[in-house]
Image (spheres, rainbow, N blue to C red):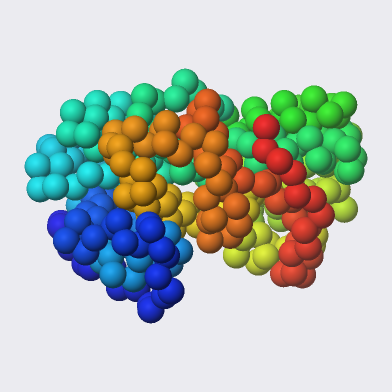
Amino acid sequence: MRTSIPVTHPPRVDRGVVATLIRPQDRLVVGVLAGPGSRLADGVRAGLAGSPDLSAEVRPLVRSVTVEAPYRGAAVDAARMLEDGVRVIVADLPTRVLRRLGPLCRQYGAALVAVSTGSLEVPDPLDGVVHVSEQRWDAAFELGDWSARHLEARLFQVIAAPEAEFDVVDALARGHRGAGGEVAGSATTHDGAAGPAGDTGAEAAALAALVAGAGTVAVHATDRAGDVVRAVRRTCGDVAILLVGPDEDAVRELSRRFGAVYSATTASAATTATDAGRLVAQAAALLAERGGSWADLTTMLAGATLEGQAGPVVLDPLTHSTRALVVVRRTSTGRPTVVARRASI
């Protein structure tokens, strides 16, 4: 499915030299490759429309293509976009697909911007690819570190197998140990091996946390988080609960049902698609001012600070990934309170 929707801008003040160098006839055409149901294109449009870096005279065009797993057609769709004049592609596809798209974009003098969860410990950067990331690994590490310093230092982890991100599980444990805490053990739920039909393993996991003497329990789950947290509260009483996986709305609802919980995200976790659009706009403005090629995007933006929708985001010059502050929250009866802001590692 292909759509081409012009991005409209509210009137804004002329930006001087940058505005005069970005000419309307040099239309900024952005390609988006995303899986079914993705809102990536909407976010990119919003980021372009809200960017302070583009003149009101410049009307970016976003061309969106839906690519279904196993993404065999992604390279063909990207090539068609590039042949049609797209000079930057934004994608939320797996790393194995990005490895194919990166060299293709460079052949056309184009850039590739990858939007991701950041759930893996940072791998070697992909050549020429800029990553706009939720930094889930970093957020979990910082939550583990903070919890060891400010909550009960004996930690037990409960992992809903179908939903957990296992690098993130490891990140929280490493952060906790690194700050002097102890990881007393872990248990897996919802893996089909717990026992009779209907037994998710949540009660057994909560009992294991109690036997381990844990004062803090980390729950790694999304849709199944309620089942696990209910069991932990019923069995372990008022232990501190860390939530890893649920979005902020789900965290608020769980706190209404089961009492205070702790969670962490980067400041920009909910705005990665919009920030990707703003990054593209900033790059376009720099190219208009200084000259150069979209293929040099990682070099051009290395170390640059982007005014993201939720606050400043820096592009790490080594990993080519965005970095934002990690925000640790305590949420009680649906009301979140920020208890720490930390620079991600």
Residue 85, image x, y percentages: 14, 47
Closest to the observer, 9 or 221:
9
Question: Residue at 53% of width from left, 61% of height from top?
Answer: 309
Residue 5, image x, y percentages: 21, 67
Residue 122, image x, y percentages: 53, 27
Closest to the observer, 231 or 345:
345
Q: Toward which corner of the image does residue 41 lie, by quadrant? A: bottom left
**From the viewer's perspective, is 253 left or right of 48?**
right
Q: Is residue 68 visible?
A: no
Q: Toward which corner of the image does residue 44 lie, by quadrant? A: bottom left
Question: Residue at 78% of width from left, 31% of height from top?
Answer: 176
Q: Is residue 212 above or below residue 84?
A: above
Q: Is residue 59 above or below residue 228?
A: below
Question: Residue at 61% of width from left, 57% of height from top?
Answer: 311
Residue 271, image x, y percentages: 50, 57
Question: Residue at 61% of width from left, 45% of height from top?
Answer: 324
How many numbered callouts?
0
**From the viewer's perspective, is 20 left or right of 82?**
right
Closest to the observer, 328 or 279:
279
Q: Toward which corner of the image does residue 161 lie, by quadrant? A: top right
Closest to the observer, 95 or 279:
279
Quarter the C terminus occupies: top right
